[in-house]
Amino acid sequence: MSGRFLLSGEPLDEAAVVSTVASSRAGALVTFVGRVRARSRDRDVSRLEYEAFPEMVEAIFKQIADETRVKFAVDAVAIHHRIGVLSVGDTSVIIAVAAEHRQPAFDACRFAIDRLKQIAPIWKKEHSPDGATWVGDRP
Amino acid sequence: MQITVRLFASHREAAGTAELVVELPAGSRAADALAMCRKSHPDLPSSDRGIAFAVNREFAEPQTALRDGDEVAVLPPVAGG
């Protein structure tokens, strides 16, 4: 059974992520699923290549979850992220938030994915028919 | 002192390796480790712009002082999610 924070080279399992935060106290479960889309910045995407700093990333996920729980007073936050080569339609990230009520759960989930994009040591290379670029390196 | 430098994404590709070990004088700082890597691997991006550092797997400043045996991670702009 996987924990709340996971970096994996294998396909992610939404039900497994949700099960790590669900409880009898939580009347609201909000899940964000990030997927590889076919177009990005006016280019066709053939695949994405994700790379991470594995020894650091799960601690950062825990830090993001702790920040999120304190800020929104939600019960629990889980973050799973995939690395390796992903195709269009593959799931790259799943965040699940459990809270007593829906409003803080929605707000917390949005905050957690925004924070992940800001600080998690993860990179992606976009492969398109015209070539490949590391996202963020672009001028 | 001996410092291990971890490279990721565009930096890893430019250097052709994910890890370098560099010898630095006492008093060196995190950004000095990357500067030393550029001497042996001139294809590394020449600017620190947008680069963050982690020392021993904690976020650090470019000016963070290093000790012998430290690991410096060079973190280009992140793009998770």
Image (spheres, rainbow, N blue to C red):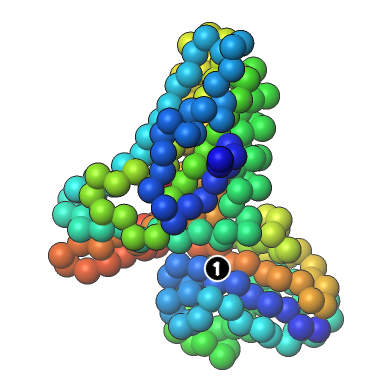
Residue A122 shows in the view: yes
Residue A120, percent from left and from top: 54, 49
Q: Which x, y percent locates residue A115?
A: 53, 38
Q: Give the camera-side residue of A88 and B37.
A: A88
| Depicted A25 relative to depicted B26: above or below | above
Q: Residue furthest bottom?
A: B40
- Crowd tier of the residue under label 1, counting other residues whose Cα lies within 10 Å: few below 14, some 14–19, many 20 or above: few
Q: Quadrant of the N terminus of chain A?
A: top right
Q: Position of residue B25 (x, y in %)?
A: 80, 85
Q: Secondary structure at mark 1?
A: loop
Q: Quadrant of residue A127?
A: bottom left
The amino acid beneath tag 1 is: Asp
- Name the residue rendered at 55%, 72% in the picture: B7
Query: Quick one: quadrant of the C terminus of chain A?
Result: bottom left
State which chain disc 1 sits on: B
**Going by the image, does B51 lie left or right of A66?**
left
**Is residue A103 at all visible to an observer of this figure?**
no
User: Residue B11: image x %, image y %?
Assistant: 48, 73
Residue matched to label 1: B48
Q: Is residue A111 above or below residue A53?
A: above
- Which residue is depicted at the point 56% across and 41% down? A2
Identify the residue at horizontal 38%, vertical 48% (top origin). Answer: A11
Where residue A69 sits, quadrant-wise, is top right
